[in-house]
Amino acid sequence: MGRSRRAAKREGMDRRTLFAYGAAAAAVAAARPALGADRRPAPDAPAKVEAFELDELTINDLQKKMVSGEETARSLTEKYIARIEAMDKRGPGLRSVLEINPDAIAIAEKLDEERKASRVRGLLHGIPVLVKDNIGTADRMTTTAGSLALEGSIPSSDSFVAKMLRESGAVLLGKTNMSEWANFRSTHSSSGWSGRGGQCRNPYALDRNASGSSSGSGAATAANLCAVSVGTETDGSIVSPSNNCSLVGIKPTLGLASRAGIVPIAHSQDTPGPMCRTVADAAALLAAMAGTDPADPATKEATARLGRGYAKSLDPRGLEGARIGVPRKGLYGQNAAADRIVERALEDMKKLGAVIVDPADIETVSAFEKNELEVLLYEFKTDLNLYLAALPSARIKSLKDAIEFNEKNRDREMPYFGQELFLQAEKKGPLTEKAYRDALEADSKNARKDGIDKTMDKHKLDALVAPTSSPATLIDQVNGDYGVNGSSTIPAVAGYPDITVPAGYDFGLPVGISFFGRAWSEAMLIRIAYAYEQATKHRRPPKFLTTADLSSR
């Protein structure tokens, strides 16, 4: 469902080599301002970037405007559509939105009628939401995972997530661009590129990567093209683009939100989740998406675990007494700028009453380099074949068909990178094979019992904290992504929750910190993340600069 480009594990580069390279490069970058040789004037924003009256407004802000009559669901929808046309299709040309829902205004009008009749469904009533292009909707939009092979594909029914959003009163505004096939096609991909949408760009610096695979959801939400958005993650694809776009992203416990009806990578790690500008918005969106779905057995506990939602977690004093561990081994030392920002965050949390346990290392941190990819390759073939076989009138019905389509349409589908992961996955056998079962068992043990659980038990922790990722790297369609490090793998493999929050900037490029912990600990993590966010208020909107501002840090 979504995988950030983690070159250390996917392209054969030794993890330590990559860490050393990243640290050395960061050290050089950190030295430049002192040398004075690379002090450039601040870059200009591209032409036609105008102020937007809905900039940075939260769900609560928008609800107040609708309650007062200053706005309606229709007027909000129209304004966001105009914003998309001005900023995504023209102006900076973010390429973050693939299509607008042709029924969006009609949906908004019906919701306005309900409001007039005093029938308000909840916090999301009338709120325009963008969803990633792998989230199935049975309407006049398509669901393609960014691939031309699925162009025009419409599933026979909504995904559970889309159904829940509709029932909550959200306006499904459109589909966002994404790394094609959720970044599980090539070992040398450029995150944010798809055959349907081209290259998505980062609104903080247009030559920088928004990260994958929920790149469009990240860029669009950061640029205020919607109120909130939904992404998906297999390993890093909610938290990494949220890091790069100064957002709050929540990768929930596997099974809190249903995967049914979403183009898959791997059922042992896939999950949808919210991508928003504030913790409160992310908590509200997650509560609206979550729930037990008979079509997804992993969600059998979801409704009970969710309870009444996360409103009680929005406590500005939520860090008082919280025990937060610092797993330095393997998760720090990857990028000097990210480390510097997180060290400052640790000091801020201490001042807010948190107990910082440092270090609180996860001893199994490097135990996933081979097994994770093996599991994903096996599950991708099985899960994708099941998904495609159930699609009505699809031009492809299997992974093999997708491979053949890409070869026949190489000029449009593979102009920059190939389909190495597709070819590797196609060679895999059924999920009964010993190689798969052994890899899955090892991953689960190393990530859960011997990983996060053991560390948290040992130190009596409420959460662990680490840099989410490095600042955004340059878009590179020649060589693919590079230097992408982060902390997403352990919670992703465990199926445990992971929340990233804006923590600062390096040369104007966002950096986030991640709080992760045990299964079903969303309420605690949201509580910690909210208290940190409210005390620091690091997020600032993008300026749509043509390149990073090297004149300041």
Image (tube, grey):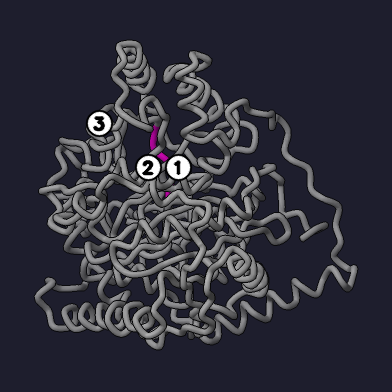
Mark 1 or mark 3: which is in front? Answer: 1
Q: How far, Cα to Cα, is label 3 from label 2? A: 12 Å
- Residue under the point 42% across and 55% down: 526
Q: Earlier in the sequence, mark 1 or mark 3?
A: 3
Work out whether residue 255 or residue 397 is closer to the camera in this orientation and state it: 255
Task: Classify residue 256 by image quadrant.
Answer: bottom left
Main structural element of the magenta stretch: helix, strand or loop? strand
Q: Is residue 123 above or below residue 477?
A: above
Picture layout, residue 29 above or below residue 173: below
Q: Which mark is residue 285?
A: 2
Q: Position of residue 544 (x, y in %)?
A: 67, 42
Which quarter of the rendering shows the C terminus? Answer: bottom right
Q: For the point 56% across and 66% down, which residue is it? A: 353
- Checking the image for residue 265, the label placed there is none
Question: Tag 1: residue type?
Answer: Asp
- Marks 1 and 2 close (CB-CB < 8 Å): yes
Residue on which the image places disc 1: 281
Residue bearing mark 3: 167
